[in-house]
Image (tube, helix red, strand yellow):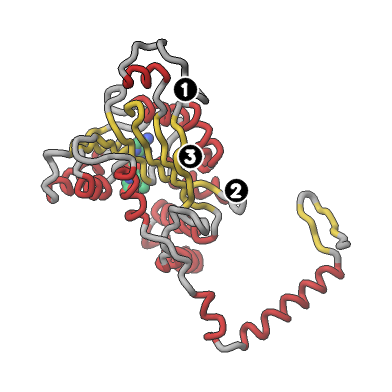
Amino acid sequence: MRRMYHRGQVEWPSMSDRKERIEAFYRFLWPFLAADKSEYAYLDEAPGGRPASEFLGEIPARRGIGAGSRLVDVGCGKGKQLVELGKRLGCDLIGVDPLEQNLELAAERVWKESLQQRVTLRKGSIEKLPLEDASVDFVWCLDMFNHVEDIEGAIAECARVLKPGGSMMNCSAVGSDLLEPREARRVTDRLGINLDTLSQERMAAAFQAVGLRIVEYGTTTDEGSPFLEVFDDDMARHALRFGKMRRSRSRMTARLGQEAFDILSAYDEWNIFLLLGKTTYGVWVLERVRSHSQQEEEAGSPPGSRPPPPGT
Ligand SMILES: C[S@@+](CC[C@H](N)C(=O)[O-])C[C@H]1O[C@@H](n2cnc3c(N)ncnc32)[C@H](O)[C@@H]1O
């Protein structure tokens, strides 16, 4: 039985345990460093997966979206996905973003792709979508939800604009147990990210509370996830730049200015979190459940004339 010393929450190994660990460490390390690299080539193998644009782009079609459907891209930014979805699905699209500068760039892209007949751009935010109740078939939220202040209110708003039976996709960052609260706060503050949105449990509860059933959930980094994203070696660039910037802080600050230095450091660190498994991206595919009376109406019988379906 191993003895452990407790200092606060942390378990410290005893002297004899530490000696065993040091021995185990070098027993592994020296032969590992001395071995021919080819013996360990498998350590550099790519973990698999697909580009996110590919597997996320398939979701609306899988949920029945096509010509004649209406999709809203909430937080559409510069309109990259909006245009790609428009070309892929042939549906009508609404791009919503709170920033005028983003909408202008999105408009340019829409014109360039000659999609202006099917794409409308509107200034607005997820907390108050510029859309009628039950007016869209699909709500698309990609990499925007971490900026949301009122989690439950925003999700309720998405449910409001969805037609009964309509679907939603949300892809946003969630934290793992490796993420320390202090480092998380430092980085998220600077990037305008609401720390609470990193709670997978809180997000899931908020979806379910407004009648958005979770049809699929997976992360972009977990082995075996249907949404496993291909590993991009370019992510390491964030780590290298972060390290270089910290070593020549005064030179870099003089060139960039303090604010830009702080933003870029936080942005690099945010991406390093993903590399280290402190965060991942959660992908939720959701369906707005039809109420019992809506199901009756669709079936053509007057409300209340049939018993409720099991499980409602
Ligand atoms: C990281 S960008 C993602 C843009 C785009 N969805 C993409 O994946 O390329 C985040 C976007 O969310 C928008 N945004 C921030 N807060 C928002 C809010 N409360 N409601 C809607 N969009 C918001 C920003 O203006 C920005 O365009």
Query: Circle 1: is it few (<14), some (14-19), or many (20+) Cα within 10 Å?
Result: few
The answer for how far apart the CA atoms under marks 2 and 3 are is 14 Å
Instruction: Give the foreground label among 2 and 3.
Output: 3
Question: Residue 89's spot in the image, x, y percent?
Answer: 23, 45
The answer for how far apart the CA atoms under marks 2 and 1 are is 48 Å
Residue bearing mark 1:
309
Q: Who's the residue at 41% across and 62% down the image?
A: 230
Instruction: Give the foreground label among 2 and 1.
Output: 1
Mark 3 or mark 2, which is nearer the start of the sequence?
A: 2
Q: Who's the residue at 52% across and 52% down the image?
A: 279
Quarter of the rendering containing residue 159: top left
Residue 182's disc is: 2
Amino acid under disc 3? Asn
Q: Is residue 23 left or right of residue 119?
A: right
Q: Tag count in the figure?
A: 3
The one nearer the camera, 234 or 287, is: 287
Question: Residue 26's spot in the image, x, y percent?
Answer: 72, 80
Query: Circle 2: is it few (<14), some (14-19), or many (20+) Cα within 10 Å?
Result: few
Mark 1 or mark 2, which is nearer the start of the sequence?
A: 2
Amino acid under disc 2? Arg
The one nearer the camera, 192 or 58, is: 58
Residue 194's disc is: 3
Question: Residue 36's spot in the image, x, y percent?
Answer: 56, 89
Q: Who's the residue at 57% across and 50% down the image?
A: 176
Does the beta carbon of the residue at mark 2 sit less than 8 Å from ligand 1? Answer: no
The one nearer the camera, 276 or 32, is: 32
Quarter of the rendering containing residue 127: top left
User: Under tag 2, what secondary structure?
Assistant: helix
Amino acid under disc 1? Pro
Quarter of the rendering containing residue 52: bottom left
Q: Report whether residue 245 is seen.
A: no
